[in-house]
Image (spheres, helix red, strand yellow):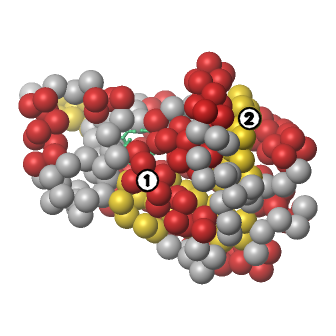
Amino acid sequence: MKLQDSVIAITGGGQGLGRAMAEYLAARGARLALIDLVPEKLDEAVAACKAAGGEAQAYTCNVAREDEVESTFAAIHDDFGQLNGLVNNAGILRDGLMIKAKNGEIEKRMSLAEWQAVIDVNLTGVFLCGREAATQMIKHGNQGVIINISSISRAGNMGQSNYSSAKAAVAALVPVWAKELARYGIRAMGIAPGFIETEMTGSMKPEALEKMTAGIPLKRMGKPEEIASAAAFIIENDYLSGRMIEVDGALRL
Ligand SMILES: NC(=O)C1=CN([C@@H]2O[C@H](COP(=O)(O)OP(=O)(O)OC[C@H]3O[C@@H](n4cnc5c(N)ncnc54)[C@H](O)[C@@H]3O)[C@@H](O)[C@H]2O)C=CC1
Ligand SMILES: CC(C)c1ccc(C(=O)O)c(O)c1O
């Protein structure tokens, strides 16, 4: 699929990797529908896409809410007249050990609320947006691609019962959707980033950053543009479906 003039929806498009992907794709001629919880961040991201030479519109939506997701994807189709791609990128972290035993006391450290919040956004949100994007594509006869953003943590990372479970599940959805949606001309792919330079890591102490990068075989964190170029590669290569691309500098957790 050509990037030029294709309509790509990106969840969590207001900042971080979502915004980086939006700017990268906008600079290559794609038309962006940016979805996020925070309208101010969306406005900044839309302006950045326009400055990069592309077209973009903002949609305030909680990806974990079925009614909001349904109306958002219907509005995207009405506004752009087509939908060719979705990047399921919105995600949150609520890290913590499941349990801790100390001095004979057993403490439940991850609450049900922390578990559920991550499952709601990182897994249910991906399901709802994937289902709605596919509905719009099939209804209007658009071929397209769905990209789920997983994580290196899908292998099982200490302190991330909720996050690792959700990220393993969205990776599992990739071959499921690739098989179910191929008949409609829709591909499904996943990207599993390792540690990527973001505002969060930018504010870390140099010693902590050094310790983190020392364990990465390529000895550096990834750049948001390196995730964005993987997304562009997936969109443009029509024989890619049902697989994960790992962009992690060879790190294994
Ligand atoms: N930054 C990293 O090193 C890595 C990130 N990832 C994944 O990449 C994705 C993006 O990560 P970052 O850019 O670092 O995150 P971020 O926290 O910088 O940005 C996430 C965006 O999603 C939005 N969002 C959160 N909940 C939402 C909801 N319910 N509905 C709509 N929008 C919502 C936020 O407002 C924010 O704009 C996430 O899925 C994350 O798990 C995976 C591996 C590494
Ligand atoms: C543990 C992994 C590499 C990780 C690190 C940081 C973030 C983030 O800031 O959003 C993630 O989403 C991760 O998956």
Q: Quadrant of residue 209?
A: top left
Whether ligand 1 has any atom under 8 Å from the Cβ at mark 1 is answered as: yes
Viewer-closest of 68 and 83: 83
Residue at 28% in and 33% down: 201
Q: Quadrant of the N terminus?
A: bottom right
* Amino acid beneath label 2: Gln
Assess whether mark 1 and mark 2 are in contact (beta carbons under 8 angstroms).
no
Residue at 31% in and 49% down: 222
Mark 2 or 1, nearer chain start: 2
What is the residue that sits farthest to the top in this orientation?
40
Viewer-closest of 131 and 28: 28
Residue 103, placed above or below residue 155: above
Q: CA distance from mark 2 to mark 1?
A: 22 Å
Viewer-closest of 11 and 70: 11
- x and y, in percent, of residue 127 in the image: 65, 53
Per the image, the residue denoted by label 2 is 57
Viewer-closest of 176 and 31: 31
Per the image, the residue denoted by label 1 is 227
Residue 71, placed above or below residue 28: above
Residue at 47% in and 61% down: 230
Whether ligand 1 has any atom under 8 Å from the Cβ at mark 2 is answered as: no
Q: Is residue 125 visible?
A: no
Q: Is residue 181 left or right of residue 49?
A: right
Q: Quadrant of the C terminus?
A: bottom left
- x and y, in percent, of residue 34 in the image: 67, 38
* Amino acid beneath label 1: Ile
SS at badge 2? strand
- x and y, in percent, of residue 151 in the image: 39, 53
